[in-house]
Structure formats: C-alpha cells, structure tokens
Amino acid sequence: MRFMMIVKGTTDSEAGVMPSQELLEAMLRYNEELAKAGVLLAADGLQASSNGIRISYPNPGEKPKVIDGPFTEAKEIIAGYTLIEVKSREEAIEWAMRMPDPHGNGQGEIELRQIMGAEDLTQNPETLAMEAALREKLEGPKKQ
C-alpha cells in the first residue's frame, strides 16, 4: 500500500521562509529512518505557490487555461510530500505520527492519503497490462 503524506503550506512557507537548520536535520533523520525501514519512496519540499502554475479545464472540449501563482488559499497549498510504501493503513499512520512538525512552529499539518493504483480504477486487462509495462520501464530492470 502506498501513501502520500502531504505537508500543508502555511503563511511562512508561502512567504518563502526556510526551515531552521535544526528542523532540516530532524527531517533528514526522519527520512533516514523511513529509508532504513525500506518504506521511503520519495520526499521533497515544494517552492511557494508564487512559483507555481495551475492548469484549469473549464469546460469539456475547451483548451485548458494556464494560471500563474501565487494562489490565495494557504490551507489548500502543499508545501511538501513524502511517499511511503507500507503494509497497512495503521503502519502509514504510525509513520506519519513520527514526522517532526514540518514547519517547526506548531502550525504543521499533514494529510495522509492512500495512492490509487490502476487496479483500483479498472479491471480491464489491456489497461492493467499497459500500466504494468509503464511501471516496469520507470523502475528499470529488476535486481536479482
């Protein structure tokens, strides 16, 4: 089971306030724990929404619209993410609970969401085979 820990943005993260050295080191230690446990898939911070771009699909058949940031609703902004692969929802919650306050100021908030795979979206064998072939290309040759 794959999960994304979504670190919600704050007014500080949107203003480009960088984390303290202490917080950076705490996050690195946490990411090292995830890696040692074999559950870490990816972890990154994101730039402020002022550097972001949204693509909006206003109506079927119409050309998508490009909207430059910043975006106004800070509570809807994502400041970073961590992708993990675990055995259960409970294990994902346990790992999320261990993450240091991502902003280091008592304003941190993490949203934990399970990632849907192709098998969750369809049972069409051709679509599933296409998805499996794509994943194999992305992952590269299997190590024996």
Image (cartoon, rainbow, N blue to C red):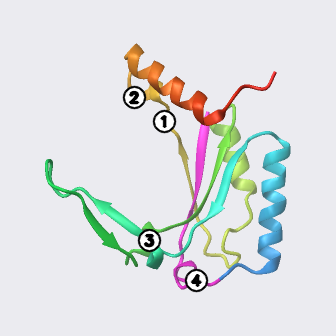
Provide the residue designation for mark 3: 52
Say if mark 2 contacts mark 1, CB within 8 Å: yes
Q: Counting residues from the N terminus, which is met first, the one under dot 1 or under dot 3? A: 3
- Image quarter of the N terminus: top right
Spatial CA span between label 1 and label 3: 25 Å
Spatial CA span between label 4 and label 1: 31 Å
Number of marks in picture: 4
Q: Counting residues from the N terminus, which is met first, the one under dot 4 or under dot 3? A: 4
Provide the residue designation for mark 4: 16
- In the image, taking residue 30 as reference, residue 109 lies left or right, namely left
| Element assignment for label 2 | helix
Looking at the rendered image, the disc whose residue lies closer to the viewer, 4 or 1, is 4
Provide the residue designation for mark 1: 116
**Residue lying furthest top:** 125
Q: Nearer the viewer, residue 98 or 142?
A: 142
Amino acid under disc 2: Leu
Spatial CA span between label 4 and label 3: 13 Å
**Residue 107 x/y as whole percent:** 61, 75
Looking at the rendered image, the disc whose residue lies closer to the viewer, 1 or 3, is 3
Provide the residue designation for mark 2: 121
Q: Counting residues from the N terminus, which is met first, the one under dot 2 or under dot 3? A: 3
Q: Residues within 10 Å of mark 2 (few under 14, many from 20)?
A: few
Spatial CA span between label 2 and label 3: 29 Å
Q: Is residue 9 visible?
A: yes
| Element assignment for label 4 | loop
Q: Nearer the viewer, residue 1 or 46?
A: 46
Q: Which residues are magenta?
A: 1-17
Q: Counting residues from the N terminus, which is met first, the one under dot 2 or under dot 1? A: 1
Q: Counting residues from the N terminus, which is met first, the one under dot 4 or under dot 2? A: 4
| Element assignment for label 1 | loop
- Image quarter of the C terminus: top right
Q: Residue at x 69, y 36 (%)?
A: 86
